[in-house]
Image: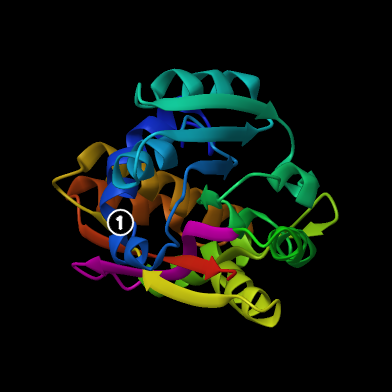
């Protein structure tokens, strides 16, 4: 892929992200949300999706460890929104950072964190009594039409890759949303979840092709013996319809 967190990749996926997020969860949000802290904000796609769906005026605190992405996020928000940026690793967030914040958000973040890191975020939100909307965590479920005999093996290899150990950190991968939901419930939050699958296919050929390259590339890295090259060639020759499972988690502290 063009890079998991590159501006090009984030721009390519933004329309699919916007279509996938479970808008029904917004009906459960507490009233009076004015200040939002967005974790791992990237180029700000979560803000561009959510801000128009909340009452104005708003303040968004964009948090990321990439200064270039932070600048793009700040520049791309609606004009009615006040934006500040915070260059920081989201795993270092403290309850003091949430002083005055009404909602914590993130998108496509939890699955690249560890159990301890997600548990830390949950405990921080619980200590500050700030609700959280964590969207688009992968669930590992992929459905492709038409089917191919190798689909299941590629899916299993990719999911194992998502749970790999990186620098001594064991990533949650497809288990992230369920883990976060359980941790929030344990911390005393009311938790609501919603399915938010990506819908890929001929209507989104560039994104579908890039996702296929990344999906099969990760599978091949996990299991080099898989005949991924011919499989990818087959899939790219006729862009299939794909559903990529994600889940959104809303945790409300009263």
* Crowd rating for badge 1 (residues with CA inside 10 Å; few <14, some 14–19, many 20+): many
Give whichever of 205, 198 is nearer the camera. Answer: 198
Pointer 1: what residue?
20
Asked if the stretch drawn in magenta spans residue 225, the answer is no
Q: Please give the name of the residue rendered at 43% of the width and 42% of the height, measured from the top-left corner.
A: 46
Q: What sort of colour scheme is used for the picture?
A: rainbow
Give percent across and percent down for residue 125: 68, 60
- 82 left or right, relative to 253: left
Considering only vertical position in the picture, is 70 above or below 130? above
- Which SS does the magenta portion mostly show? strand
Q: Magenta region: which residues?
A: 131-150
Give percent across and percent down for residue 73: 48, 26
Give whichever of 118, 36 is nearer the camera. Answer: 36
- 89 left or right, relative to 67: right
Q: Please give the name of the residue rendered at 72% of the width and 58% of the height, measured from the top-left corner.
A: 128
Q: Please give the name of the residue rendered at 37% of the width and 49% of the height, measured from the top-left corner.
A: 212
């Amino acid at each position: 892929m063009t890079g998991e967190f590159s501006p090009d990749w984030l721009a390519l996926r933004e329309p699919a992200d916007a279509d996938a997020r479970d808008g029904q969860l917004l009906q459960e949000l507490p009233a009076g949300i004015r200040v939002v802290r967005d974790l791992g904000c990237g180029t700000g796609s979560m803000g561009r999706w959510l801000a128009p769906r909340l009452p104005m005026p708003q303040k968004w605190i964009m948090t990321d460890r990439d200064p270039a992405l932070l600048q793009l996020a700040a520049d791309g928000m609606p004009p009615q929104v006040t934006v500040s940026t915070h260059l920081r690793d989201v795993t270092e967030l403290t309850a003091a950072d949430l002083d005055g914040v009404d909602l914590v958000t993130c998108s496509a973040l939890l699955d690249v964190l560890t159990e301890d890191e997600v548990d830390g975020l949950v405990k921080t939100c619980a200590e500050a009594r700030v609700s959280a909307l964590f969207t688009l965590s992968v669930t590992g479920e992929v459905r492709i039409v038409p089917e191919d005999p190798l689909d299941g093996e590629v899916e299993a290899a990719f999911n194992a890759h998502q749970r790999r150990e990186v620098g001594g950190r064991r990533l949650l991968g497809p288990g992230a949303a369920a883990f976060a939901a359980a941790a929030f419930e344990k911390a005393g939050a009311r938790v609501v979840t919603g399915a938010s699958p990506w819908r890929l296919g001929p209507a989104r050929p560039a994104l579908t092709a890039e996702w296929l390259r990344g999906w099969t590339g990760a599978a091949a890295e996990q299991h080099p013996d898989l005949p991924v090259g011919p499989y990818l060639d087959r899939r790219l020759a006729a862009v299939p319809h794909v559903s990529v499972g994600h889940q959104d988690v809303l945790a409300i502290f009263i």
